[in-house]
């Protein structure tokens, strides 16, 4: 392997599937996550299209209520557990975190491969429940007592979640160890790219929060199998307790989803404005701050659950506080654009789109955190629209930005710019049509998880369904672009964007151990422009 | 009562009006903040478009004034919304004098609405306009949520405990009941109608003189009205289930505490803590009597789980409320 230093990592192993199956290279693992999570996005997306087809008009279109209930449950469960939680850390975190800090790989490469296989195993367990059993019809939130009583394959679904949880925990553990121990000479914490800060904050959440969903799924499985009355009131249990357990993880989980995306936006906006980031420390600390505060707000999912008014007041107050670090980031990204040299190529389009859609998502979050307003909005399409704006218009759009931004580095080819721009406009148009209409339906009180609805909501549902077809077209265009360009794209230079973080000093694609010589860093990652 | 609203279902309650006041302001503030931010973003993206590959940008790594102004602005915004929400919410949950009480039992997939008079309806509620109403609610099976979009409020309905919803309707009319917590197959069919009646019509309804069959999408004939009020039924259960063996109705101490004056009083427990004898306390005492032992009494009471239905417990509570 002595001349491996000069060969890109694809060529540094014997060709064939075994070079992937047994790889310890974080870059190959990142690419395997890429293929898997994009497939998951398609599966979850097909379920979404089916949901929207059923809801296109009042009355039953394609599916009876039981089938519809399974479809919306699987849409949520697949999107959350197979796609959005693993994607950015698994794909871009794996590929770029070590390179960005000047390391050859993560701290525990075997553990990294295990994380990937645990994701596959969890997905396989879910698939068993879907194909061999009859899936689940509980909603992705599995609330008790219904999830105890229903005859669907709840245990397969939650057991899969349990296994996938370990994928997440081990990835987080690996990344924390990597950041603490493998930074190259000169790479102080405050010279790390903000993407690394974001992944690090996410890793803290992955390690601390995920065990809670693990134990919650175990308790639910025990109650289904053995009738131990944690949650069933007829056995002396408390159904609302499940909600506390579930959301104690699932609220930090939404920060696991969004923080890495925010890290990508920091990278793309800075590099493609060729201007140093405004407020580096504010953004870095706001990532950590959001991660920690995210543990204190879970009850805002439960304002109407029957929990005490005091709990409601406290959760509403702390929820409002989380708006501040997020707003700081939005202001700082905007301020970074000021007097920049802005390139409006595809990655930047998606990043600017993020500012638009995450802005709407965040503002509607402040409205939902207002206690009295949530008494109306809870469990309506207003909430559904809000979380799609922050999850899809936040994390997913940032993922797309990152995919195009780092595509040249990962593949050694340039993506097709025209197709990239087309995908952006299809996606952003479709996304806003789909979900703005849902805000209106929710304002009018349309409840969520409804197989059929009152005709007063018909217009908004029709509009939303048509919008979903444009989203599908946009995502399809992304996938076609990726596959086409990997084969036929022109060769990419090592630094197509003029970036200043360490990944742009390597080859495109990088050599096996990322750097021919371990770098020594003497400045931060965003030293554009003239220091005053 | 017609104000501008994007909401196609008009507000019909005091809490609904409070919601409308808030949401109109919130949507305007949100839109203004959003449009302002996006205008700046688009302007910068246009004005600072790359000119040459050798553009030099200024090194602006931060500005404390801008940063703290932003933080200050956001903090004011969320503080105002928080306080507004707190104020409206406290108003909504505060019980009022002379509330008209209605019991609701949610079950897969219908709403049983019980009145003190003993009348029970399926999926139909009758409320007097301009009078505070208190729904005392529970579920027979899984979680549901009682939601009237025109009132702009909802409350989850939980098996094994009571939750309450306070509302003062202020516009007569027929409004939707939706179930707003996913509960299985017919979740979206668990619908009903709230009839808010003028004082005159409500009096007629109470006297049984109002035509109750309505041509609504989900109209269902009211179930046969019982001949006993809830309190009378509760009194009957108290004797037939032999509660009177250990609990007096006249105030005397017996094997167990008296039920006269119990409801709403403060009870001292064995450890010294005080609890309020509300609906949840009564229900728990019947189903899980070992959970709270009253000071000075021995733990003898058996559970009545499986022997008393949710309706029976509602009736007993109604009876206790008459024993002042």
Image: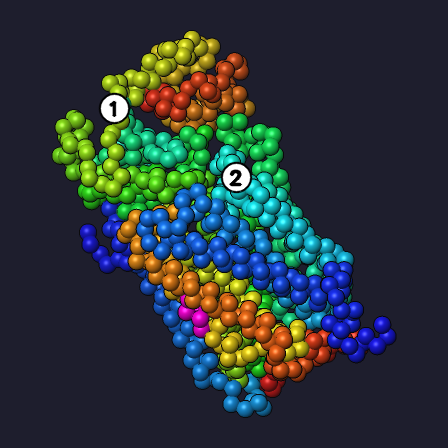
User: Is B304 rendered above or below residue A414?
Assistant: above
- Quarter of the image for residue A410 reads bottom right
| The C terminus of chain B - image quarter | top left
Residue nearer the viewer, B125 or A162 = A162
Residue B272: x %, y % from top left: 52, 24
Helix, strand or loop status at disc 1? loop
User: What residue is shown with label 1?
Assistant: B224
Which residue is under mark 2?
A152
- The chain identifier of the residue carrying mark 1 reads B
Q: Give the range drawn in magenta.
A: A425-430
Q: Is residue A402 above or below residue A225?
A: below
Q: In this view, does A216 lie to the left or right of B265?
A: right
Q: Answer whether residue B132 is magenta in the image.
A: no
Badge 2 element: loop
Report how far apart the C-alphas of labels 1 and 2 lie in the structure.
Answer: 36 Å
Pick the residue in front: A247 or B181: B181
């Amino acid at each position: 392997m002595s001349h491996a230093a000069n060969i890109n990592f694809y060529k540094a192993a014997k060709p064939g599937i075994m070079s992937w199956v047994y790889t310890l290279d974080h870059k190959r693992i990142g690419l395997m996550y890429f293929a898997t999570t994009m497939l998951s996005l398609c599966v979850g997306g097909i379920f979404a299209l089916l949901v929207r087809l059923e809801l296109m008009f009042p009355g039953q279109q394609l599916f009876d209520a039981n089938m519809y209930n399974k479809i919306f449950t699987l849409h949520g469960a697949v999107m959350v557990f197979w796609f959005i939680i693993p994607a950015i850390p698994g794909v871009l975190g794996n590929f770029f975190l070590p390179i960005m800090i000047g390391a050859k790989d993560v701290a525990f490469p075997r553990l990294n491969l295990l994380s990937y296989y645990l994701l596959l195993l969890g997905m396989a367990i879910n698939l068993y429940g879907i194909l061999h059993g009859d899936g689940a019809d509980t909603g992705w939130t599995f609330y008790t007592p219904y999830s105890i009583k229903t005859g669907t394959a709840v245990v397969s679904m939650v057991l899969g979640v349990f296994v996938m949880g370990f994928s997440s925990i081990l990835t987080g553990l690996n990344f924390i160890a990597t950041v603490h121990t493998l930074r190259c000479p000169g790479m102080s914490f405050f010279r790390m790219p903000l993407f690394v800060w974001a992944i690090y904050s996410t890793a803290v959440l992955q390690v601390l929060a995920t065990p809670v969903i693990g134990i919650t799924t175990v308790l639910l499985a025990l109650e289904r199998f053995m009738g131990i009355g944690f949650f069933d009131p007829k056995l002396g249990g408390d159904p609302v307790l499940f909600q506390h357990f579930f959301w104690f993880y699932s609220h930090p989980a939404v920060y696991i989803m969004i923080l890495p995306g925010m890290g990508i936006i920091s990278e793309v906006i800075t590099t493609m404005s060729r201007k140093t980031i405004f407020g580096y420390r504010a953004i870095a600390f706001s990532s950590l701050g959001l991660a920690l505060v995210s543990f204190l707000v879970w009850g805002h999912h439960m304002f109407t659950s029957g929990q005490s008014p005091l709990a409601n007041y406290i959760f509403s107050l702390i929820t409002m506080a989380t708006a501040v670090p997020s707003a700081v980031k939005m202001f700082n990204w905007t301020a970074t654009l000021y007097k920049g040299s802005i390139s409006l190529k595809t990655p930047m389009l998606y990043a600017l789109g993020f500012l638009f859609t995450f802005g709407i998502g965040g503002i509607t979050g402040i409205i939902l955190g207002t206690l009295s307003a949530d008494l109306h909005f809870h469990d309506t399409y207003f909430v559904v629209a809000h979380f799609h704006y922050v999850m899809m218009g936040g994390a997913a759009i940032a993922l797309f930005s990152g995919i195009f931004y780092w595509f040249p580095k990962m593949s050694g080819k340039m993506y097709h710019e025209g197709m990239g721009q087309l995908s952006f406009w299809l996606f952003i148009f479709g996304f806003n049509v789909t979900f703005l209409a849902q805000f209106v339906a929710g304002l009018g009180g349309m409840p969520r998880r409804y197989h059929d609805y009152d005709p007063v909501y018909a217009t908004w549902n029709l509009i939303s369904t048509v919008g979903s077809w444009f989203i599908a077209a946009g995502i399809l265009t992304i996938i076609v672009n990726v596959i086409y360009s990997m084969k036929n794209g022109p060769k990419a230079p090592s630094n197509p964007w003029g970036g200043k973080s360490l990944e742009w000093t390597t080859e495109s694609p990088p050599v096996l151990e990322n750097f021919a010589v371990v770098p020594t860093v003497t400045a931060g990652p965003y030293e554009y422009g003239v220091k005053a | 009562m017609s104000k501008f609203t994007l909401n196609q279902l008009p507000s019909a309650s005091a809490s609904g009006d409070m919601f409308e006041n808030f949401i109109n302001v919130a949507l305007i503030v949100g839109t203004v903040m959003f449009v302002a931010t996006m205008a700046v973003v688009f302007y910068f993206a246009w004005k600072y478009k790359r000119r040459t590959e050798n553009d030099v940008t200024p090194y602006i790594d931060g500005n404390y004034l801008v940063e703290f102004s932003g933080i200050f602005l956001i903090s004011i915004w969320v503080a105002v919304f928080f306080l507004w929400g707190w104020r409206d919410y406290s108003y909504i949950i505060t019980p009022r004098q002379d509330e008209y009480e209605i019991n609701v039992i949610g079950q897969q997939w219908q709403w049983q609405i019980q009145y003190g008079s003993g009348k029970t309806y399926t999926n139909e509620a009758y409320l007097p306009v301009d009078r505070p109403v208190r729904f005392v609610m529970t579920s027979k099976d899984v979680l549901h949520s009682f939601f009237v979009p025109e009132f702009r409020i909802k409350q989850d309905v939980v098996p094994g405990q009571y939750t309450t919803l306070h509302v003062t309707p202020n516009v007569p009319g027929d409004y939707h009941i939706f179930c707003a917590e996913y509960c299985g197959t017919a979740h979206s069919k668990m619908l009903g109608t709230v009839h808010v009646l003028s004082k005159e019509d409500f009096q007629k309804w109470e006297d049984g003189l109002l035509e109750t069959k309505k041509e609504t999408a989900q109209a269902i004939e009211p179930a046969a009205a019982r001949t006993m009020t809830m309190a009378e039924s509760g009194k009957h259960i108290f004797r037939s289930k032999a509660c009177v063996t250990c609990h007096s109705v006249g105030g005397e101490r017996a094997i167990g505490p008296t039920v006269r004056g119990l409801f709403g009083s403060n009870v001292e427990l064995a450890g010294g803590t005080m609890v309020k004898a509300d609906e949840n306390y009564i229900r728990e005492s019947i189903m899980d009597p070992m959970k709270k032992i009253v000071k000075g009494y021995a733990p003898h009471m058996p559970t009545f789980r499986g022997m008393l239905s949710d309706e029976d417990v509602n009736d007993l509570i109604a009876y206790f409320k008459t024993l002042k």
